[in-house]
Amino acid sequence: MKKLWNGRFKDYAADWIEEFGASISFDQELVMEDLQGSIVHVEMLKECGIISEEDAELITGGLKSLKAKAEKNELLYDVSSEDIHLNLEKMLIEKIGPVGGKVHTGRSRNDQVATDMHLYLKKQVKEIINEIGDFQEVLMGKASGHIETIAPGYTHLQRAQPISFAHHLMAYFWMLQRDKERYQDSLKRIDLSPLGAGALAGTTFPIDRQMTAEKLGFSDLYENSLDAVSDRDFIVEFLSNSSILIMHLSRFAEEVILWASQEFQFIELHDSYATGSSIMPQKKNPDMAELIRGKTGRVYGHLIGMLTILKGLPLAYNKDMQEDKEGMFDTVKTIRTSLKVFTGMIETMSVNEQRLSAAVRKDFSNATELADYLAAKGIPFREAHEIVGKLVLKCIGEGKYLSDVKLEEFKESCPLIEESIYNILTPEQAVMRRNSYGGTGFEQIKLQLKQAEKALKKECVPQ
């Protein structure tokens, strides 16, 4: 089949080579962006007197007709036309005749594809920002209902200090807030128009790049045509931001998996976010959380792949850059689906308050309370730490906890200990008294929720 770039060539590649070089199997994802960019480009060509009004109207009409078909998923793509750009141009020429070839006046596939990806990623990042916000709202709602639910806090996966379960959930709220801000900041670099940069050097036609940028909704232009067609930093940044986000989701997924286990029993997942076993009838597996944890490697892989593609490329465009799209598309799908699944999973999970309460009463997570108590009475903290450490060791040997120790035994360890210690050692007091800013104290969590509400109300996505 004759190529749109046929003039220089006498022979054609074999079908299998042609298929290897083609990108239409995946870059058809950009069909709406490609048509949008072409329509605006033609409008600019007309306004600048580069093509006639009659030709512009004919071409625009053809492009809008293709767009209507694309919206209904009725376009048929051909691998022999290589990519989304040549497929659409070929369809346009078949529809309106040779005048359709004027659509490519003053541009190259290099600036065309870059424009498509900027448009695509700008839209997708805004959607991701909104979906992170939806997840944050669910976390706030769940946290609001569990301010006074006491849970074990861990370091090294060992019981450390009792905390509010709401405090634990809100830690992820603020991680997500930083993720959202990273995506938001990246829009400044996504929201640049490469259109009009040509293959690498601009064009001799009197085009108006500012006009096409404004019509496409871009806030600014690339200042250098070489940079415009060779830049994929905005994709690297998207993949980097997505890697940090999915790392946060993976950490949360790991905790959900632990909490839902028989050993912890802190939560129960809704049936719609779990699966059973084909052989063990009793099983309820946290498969959705496990899948999100597993997909982390997939997103990381796309980031490393993109960095590797770019690391040795001379300016400007090289065919290697065709490999920039599949990882981007897959990451968008993975991130958006993972956010949606996690949001529903947390919204529908039930919290076992009794199990959490029992967990913090049968451990030594209140040992720091006793050390702080002694320090408040003037004993240097390091000495207080040693006194309590020896007392814990004694309790372990006798099979009891600090709350079981009699007052006279406490006084043997330190005469300054008084009856009030028993109230201080309760999990509720241990949590309530940690009222430093950002701490797990109930009043601090209420303040934190107010701060979180303010953060969500801030304008996140530029219109």
Image: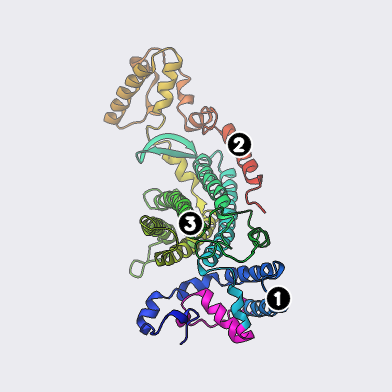
Asked if residue 15 is positioned above or below residue 323 in the image, the reply reads below
Name the quadrant of the C terminus.
bottom right
Tell me, yes or no, if residue 44 can be seen here. Answer: yes
Magenta-span inclusion, residue 260: no
- Residue most extreme to the left: 397
Q: Which mark is residue 52?
A: 1
Task: Say which quarter of the image contains residue 30.
Answer: bottom right
Magenta stretch mostly in which secondary structure? helix
Name the kind of residue labelled 1 in the image: Ser
Amino acid at dot 2: Lys
Quarter-of-image position of residue 92: bottom right
Q: Is residue 83 magenta?
A: yes
Tell me the SS state at disc 1: loop
The percent position of residue 75, horizontal first and vertical second, equals 56, 81
Q: Which secondary structure lies at badge 3? A: loop
- Of the two numbered discs 1 and 2 on the same chain, state the one appearing first in sequence: 1
